[in-house]
Amino acid sequence: MSLIRRNLDVLDDNFFDNFMRDLNLFRRGNIRTGWAPSLDVLETEDEFIVDAELPGLNKDDINIDIHDNILTISGETKKEQRFQDENVFFRERHFGSFNRGIALPPNLNTDDVTATFENGLLEMKFPKTELSGRKIKIQ
């Protein structure tokens, strides 16, 4: 068996982030096909904030689920009827079902989440809690 030297300089800066994102989607069975909303994830001293761009949707078209510390945002955008029979020359908007999941940190209170939706931006705020744990004495 021979060792192969790898040139790690060829990996881009987002390699690990992309790997973790894809791994989270794969574990949940949500291999991304089509489109998914863009997310901003922010952390303050007191809370964890997730913003999702969902233009053209109503709040009733969006599903938010938290299971096993995985936040899943899903829904569907529909094509406008006026474009069904026309010759479309250029289309950049996305239509169809979407499903986006991200792993949440363990120190969040997922029972007190607030979610607002305004002008196509879904904002979820998760209050932080103290990490719980206990010290185990070795006998």
Image (tube, rainbow, N blue to C red):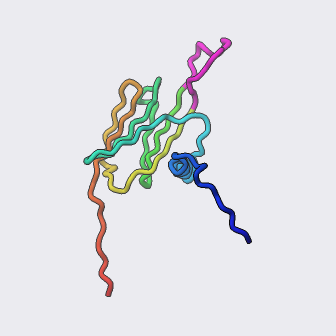
- Residue drawn at x 41%, y 26% is 120
Quadrant showing the C terminus: bottom left
- Residue drawn at x 37%, y 56% is 106
Q: Quadrant of residue 39?
A: top left
- Residue drawn at x 68%, y 12% is 87
Is residue 28 magenta-colored? no
Residue 94 picture location, percent across and down: 57, 27
* In this view, 68 is above or below 133: above
Q: Main secondary structure of the magenta part?
A: loop
Quadrant showing the N terminus: bottom right
- Residue drawn at x 57%, y 27% is 95
Q: Which residues are magenta?
A: 78-96
Residue 26 picture location, percent across and down: 58, 51
Is residue 85 magenta-colored? yes
Residue 94 is left or right of residue 44, and the answer is: right
Residue 4 is left or right of residue 37, and the answer is: right
Q: Toward the viewer: 74 or 124?
A: 124
* In this view, 16 is above or below 59: below
Q: Toward the viewer: 123 or 3?
A: 3
Q: Residue furthest bottom?
A: 139
Residue 125 picture location, percent across and down: 32, 41
Work out whether residue 28 can be spotted: no
* In this view, 19 is above or below 139: above
Residue 116 picture location, percent across and down: 33, 33
Work out whether residue 43 can be spotted: yes
Q: How many marks?
A: 0
Q: Residue furthest right?
A: 1
Residue 47 is left or right of residue 100, and the answer is: left
